[in-house]
């Protein structure tokens, strides 16, 4: 079994699902989203990034399953009190060594710790089928409904993402649909209406919709990695977010602005 690399373990997170959570950030992603605020997550192998002290720091570390379970267990009292748990994020966890991810989820479930998967959906269908019995839901980042737009801004088409979203819904998995909004790109009513229509037409069951306005956190990371920054977008206006929230609520969805 190949051990994946993790580039961050974030404790007391409140933006990666319900309650207080510990988030394991796996390194490596099939996408290169132009707005990515964690560019150090994109490559699957360790890499050097300039740290605050000006020295090169190696990003990416391997942990045994036992080590990660122990880290999660140390926070279990907070999970139990808040309805939280552990979130596997990235990068893209569903493209990692799936036997490792499956066993980690299985071990956490065995000791009563809730697990959520944060995913873009661009991963083998078989990987989702393996994880479904051991996780409590998916934070599903639907980038764009239109495949050409998806390809333009992420480097990949979205047919697989839509297929896996359908699979999770049909299998009874809980879906927290996360929609990143970029000013004058996908923050308009027609774009959201198309998403609602697609969800309804395909009978996709959604637990909650999170509207995520673009932010430019992490711009300095590109320089520290020796890359050109592609984070050159704007956040939607507050009034726009409220209008889209009302539109989704009118369609019967529970909606939250922010993660």
Image (spheres, rainbow, N blue to C red):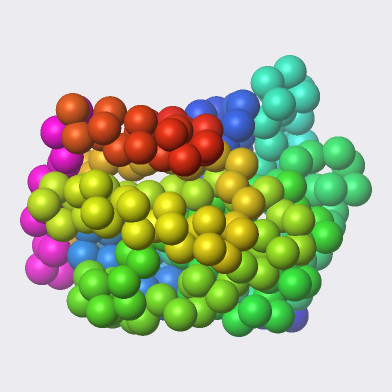
Which residue corresponds to the image point at 77% horizontal and 71% vertical from the top-left? 130
**Residue 242 percent coordinates (x, y):** 28, 28
Place residue 101 in its image quadrant: bottom right
Q: Nearer the viewer, residue 141 or 254?
A: 254
Q: Main secondary structure of the magenta part?
A: loop
**Residue 89 percent coordinates (x, y):** 53, 54
Which residue corresponds to the image point at 26% horizontal and 32% vertical from the top-left? 243
Q: Is residue 209 above or below residue 182?
A: above
Q: How many marks?
A: 0
Which residue corresponds to the image point at 68% horizontal and 75% vertical from the top-left? 127
Which residue corresponds to the image point at 35% horizontal and 59% vertical from the top-left? 194
**Residue 208 percent coordinates (x, y):** 55, 39
Q: Which residues are magenta?
A: 227-238
Q: Is residue 245 above or below residue 221?
A: above
Asked if residue 55 shows in the view, the reply is no
Asked if residue 75 shows in the view, the reply is yes
Q: Nearer the viewer, residue 185 or 98?
A: 185
Q: Image quadrant for the N terminus?
A: bottom right
- Left or right: where does residue 45 sit relative to residue 2? left
Q: Nearer the viewer, residue 1 or 246?
A: 246
Q: Is residue 176 magenta?
A: no
Q: Most extreme residue toward the right, as rendered?
A: 110
Q: Is residue 234 magenta?
A: yes
Q: Image quadrant for the C terminus?
A: top left
**Residue 252 percent coordinates (x, y):** 52, 37
């Amino acid at each position: 079994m190949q051990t994946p690399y993790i580039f961050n373990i974030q404790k007391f997170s409140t933006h990666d699902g319900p309650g207080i959570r510990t988030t394991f950030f796996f390194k490596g992603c099939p996408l290169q989203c132009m707005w990515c605020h964690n560019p150090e997550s994109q490559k699957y192998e360790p890499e050097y990034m300039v740290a605050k002290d000006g020295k090169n720091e190696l990003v990416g570390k391997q942990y045994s399953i036992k080590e990660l379970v122990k880290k999660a267990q140390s926070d279990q009292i907070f999970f139990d009190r808040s309805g939280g748990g552990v979130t596997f994020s990235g990068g893209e966890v569903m493209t990692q060594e799936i036997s490792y991810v499956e066993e980690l989820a299985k071990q956490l479930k065995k000791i009563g710790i809730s697990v959520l998967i944060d995913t873009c959906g661009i991963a083998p269908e078989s990987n989702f089928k393996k994880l479904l019995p051991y996780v409590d839901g998916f934070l599903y980042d639907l980038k764009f409904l239109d495949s050409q737009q998806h390809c333009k801004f992420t480097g990949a088409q979205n047919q697989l993402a839509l297929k896996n979203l359908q699979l999770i819904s049909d299998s009874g998995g809980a879906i927290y649909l996360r929609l990143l909004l970029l000013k004058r790109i996908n923050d308009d009513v027609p774009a959201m209406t198309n998403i609602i229509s697609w969800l309804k037409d395909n009978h996709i069951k959604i637990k909650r919709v999170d509207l995520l306005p673009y932010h430019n956190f992490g711009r300095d990371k590109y320089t520290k990695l020796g890359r050109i920054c592609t984070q050159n977008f704007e956040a939607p206006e507050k009034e726009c977010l409220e209008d889209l929230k009302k539109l989704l609520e009118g369609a019967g969805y529970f909606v939250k602005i922010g993660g």
